[in-house]
Every structure is written in structure tokens, then in C-alpha cells.
Amino acid sequence: AMALGLREGVDADALYEVITNSAGNSWMFENRVPHILNADYTPLSAVDIFVKDLGLVLDTARSSKFPLPLSATA
């Protein structure tokens, strides 16, 4: 949503405010987007958490026989 809005010329702060006060909000969005908007790409979580979460997604996809070729490659 942020990328599309910014591409269309919407003010970043206004768009962030709208999304954080709507159903599109999440903890991750509210916590991470300000860092992105400030060009602060400091890692805020460990890679092992990403690996764990991706494993959970892949396990669920396999049990549902739902192909996720890009995720499986990662």
C-alpha cells in the first residue's frame, strides 16, 4: 500500500497516518514503516526468526498441497 501510494504521489506521512488508523494497520506496519521512511535500514530482528516463520509457512503450504515455489527457493 505504501509503495503504490508513494508511486502515485501521495504524501508519505499522510498515507502512513491513514493506514495506521484503518483496518490496514498492524504492529509490524506501525513499527517498521517509520524506519523505512527515514531510510533507517538497521536490522530490527534476527534472521533466525525469519527462517522460523518461513518454515512455518512452508509446512502449512506442504500440508495443504499448495505450491510456493519462490518461498521454497528462499
Image (tube, grey):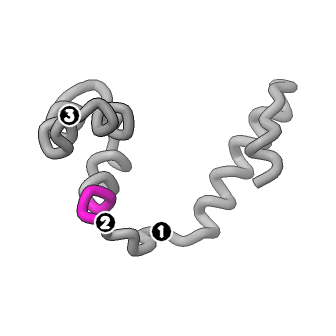
Q: Residue at x 68, y 60 (%)?
A: 51
Task: Classify residue 9 as left or right of residue 48.
Answer: left
Amino acid at pointer 1: Ser
Foreground tag (3 vs 1) = 3
Q: Please, is residue 40 above or below residue 74 in the view? A: below
Q: Residue at x 14, y 45 (%)?
A: 13
Foreground tag (2 vs 1) = 2
Amino acid at pointer 2: Ala
Percent position of residue 28, x then y:
37, 49
Tell me where residue 41 sits by quadrant. bottom left
Q: Please, is residue 66 above or below residue 51 in the view? A: above
Q: Residue at x 32, y 69 (%)?
A: 40
Q: Which structural element holds mark 2? A: loop
Task: Classify residue 68 as left or right of residue 10.
Answer: right
**What residue sits right under mark 2 in the picture?**
39
Magenta highlight: main SS: helix
**What residue sits right under mark 1 in the picture?**
45
Please provide the residue range marked out in magenta.
35-39
Quadrant housing the C terminus: bottom right
Amino acid at pointer 3: Val
**What residue sits right under mark 3 in the picture?**
10
